[in-house]
Image (tube, grey):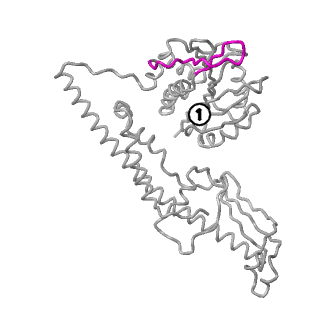
Amino acid sequence: MNRISDKTYEQFYRELFDRLKLQIESESDDYIIAQPSDDLVKYFFKDALQPIEFDSDKEESIKHEKYIKTIYSHEREWGYQQDGDLKVECEKIVVKLPIVLNRSIDQILNLRTNSISLSGGPQFTISGNNVVVEVEIKGYGKNLNNDQISSGILNTKSAIQNLFQSKNSEIEKENNKLKSQLAQFIESRKTKLDSDKKRLEELVKMIKIPIERKAGDVVKKVQIDRKPFIQKIKPKTPYEDYKLDREKVIDIIKLINNQCLQFEKTPKTYDKFDEPNLRDLILSNLNSVFEGKATGETFNSNGKTDIYLNIDKGNILVSECKIYGGQKLYHETIEQLLGYLTWRQNFGIMISFCKNKNFSKIIDEAEAIITFHNSYDSGFKKIDDSHFISKHTLPGDEYKYVEFHHLYYNLYMSSL
């Protein structure tokens, strides 16, 4: 088990709130004013800790293991220490208690609750999505019977449940407090920004000089930045080789992401939308920036790609939109997108709209599904909670690599 730090949950949340206040103050005025306060609270609350939950969908398990353990001479009884080290066959029971994946589990276990156990608490480790308890049942000077083993395991399991309950109680209390603090701060921020805006409008009327209009940050980068979309690189063949600037790809993804996050905020509006409908909305948004160069269902290489963004030199950036349907469909989509790409293209975007519940589970399984595909080479990386990148090889050319961006969006709508 991790060593308990001196920091309490209250201290952790106090520091978190200070960081969130700076983030909110760093956002553009128009963004804070325009967004509903409830949506802003939900967005900035994402860094809060989540309670530890046992996973009822998975079974607990025990395993019996035998191993050789070295008993060093100084650990042996006084009369035998002169005989040196001793190797002893030992046995242990390994118990696994499944928990729901919690990315903050190490931090949660390190933080100190208000109640401190003098005994130091139960001994366990975290391995993946399991709480692991190891009970040595036979070894040097030890030979437990079944009653002792059963009692030890059950007592440890109960102590772990009590520990998690205690920590969850602190988390829930601090989460409620943080939501209230965020709501108050955001409302206060909106009031201030509204007052600043009115004051500036009055000033403009007095001096009769209009305020310079600002384009959105992403749109500004895409439309005005003097750095070209197409960056010419040294050719490796007799042909001219062009490579799309990666920074521009990220800017384009930001445009797509801004659109799709709106889908998430109002899933009821898009509940009846299928892949073509959602794709067309994204296309409309891209065309507002790229002046008609984004098209759908366009022939490229071996098929029709969902979103085809033609920038100066031709087939540069292609994307595929799908309603998420599990590993098999996702692998088929990877193959589909690889089939669209030509040797001169270096990026592909996969957009998955998830209409089923348990979106967190889908995100947690993303790395395994992506890296298990036979085209995967390396470079899996998490950009944010639902944006991942990976490097793949093109079919028929194991030396040609393309960077895939995997975007997931939660469009599940509860029936409640």
- Residue found 79% across the figure and 23% down from its top: 396
In the rendered image, residue 6, in percent from the top left (x then y), is placed at 48, 64
Residue bearing the label numbered 1: 408
- Residue found 29% across the figure and 35% down from its top: 193
- Residue found 63% across the figure and 17% down from its top: 242
- Residue found 42% across the figure and 59% down from its top: 10
Marks counted in the figure total 1
* SS category of the residue bearing label 1: strand
Q: Is residue 38 above or below residue 266?
A: below
- In the rendered image, residue 221 lying in the magenta stretch gets the answer no
In the rendered image, residue 218, in percent from the top left (x then y), is placed at 46, 25
**Which three-letter amino acid code belongs to the residue tagged 1?**
Tyr
In the rendered image, residue 118, in percent from the top left (x then y), is placed at 53, 75
Magenta region, residue range = 224-244
In screen coordinates, is 350 left or right of 413?
right
Which residue is at the front of the view, 80 or 339? 80
